[in-house]
């Protein structure tokens, strides 16, 4: 889960990039904060760097980790 104090620093967008699920270890397409869609754990990932690997954290039922963009960085 990502947290924030001042909502005035955030701008709402409805871009399709927020709907894409990304696999662990793959390249990050957009810098920002991502959340695991299974457990809600969040991470920060930078464009063209790798998402955390599958062994970054584990789910009790063995469900696969998938990262979803929550907050997009303004800088590319």
Image (cartoon, rainbow, N blue to C red):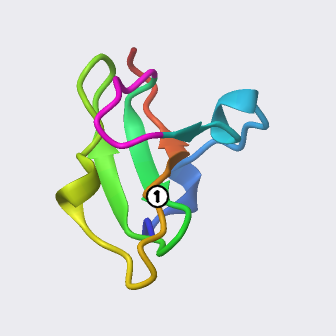
Residue shown at 49%/51% (left/top)? Answer: 66
At a point 35% along the width and 29% down the height, the residue shown is 26
Furthest-bottom residue in this view: 60
Location of the C terminus by quadrant is: top left
Tag 1 residue: 35
- Image point (51%, 45%), residue name: 71
Q: Nearer the viewer, residue 75 or 41?
A: 41
**Residue range (magenta):** 23-29
Q: Main secondary structure of the magenta part?
A: loop
Left or right of residue 43, residue 11 in this image: right
Q: Is 19 above or below relative to 2?
A: above
Relative image position of residue 12 (x, y in whole percent) = 71, 44
In the image, 32 versus 59, the foreground residue is: 59
Residue 4 seen anywhere in this rendered image of the structure: no
38 lies above or below 76: below
Furthest residue in direction right, as rendered: 14
Residue 24 on the magenta span: yes
* Numbered label tally: 1
The quadrant of the rendering that contains the N terminus is bottom left
62 falls in the magenta region: no
Q: Position of residue 53 (x, y in %)?
A: 23, 46
Q: Position of residue 13 (x, y in %)?
A: 73, 37
Percent across and percent down for residue 46 are 28, 29
Q: Quadrant of the rendered structure where residue 5 is? A: bottom left
Q: Secondary structure at mark 1?
A: strand
Q: Is residue 51 visible?
A: yes
Circle 1 crowding by C-alpha within 10 Å: few under 14, some 14–19, many from 20? many
- State the residue at coordinates (53%, 70%): 38
């Amino acid at each position: 889960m990502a947290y924030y104090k001042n909502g005035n620093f955030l701008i709402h967008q409805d871009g399709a990039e927020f709907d894409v699920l990304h696999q662990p270890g793959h390249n990050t397409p957009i810098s920002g904060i991502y959340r695991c869609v299974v457990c809600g754990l969040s991470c920060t990932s930078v464009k063209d760097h790798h998402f955390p690997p599958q062994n970054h954290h584990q789910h009790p039922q063995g469900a696969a980790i998938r990262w979803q963009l929550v907050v997009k960085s303004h800088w590319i």
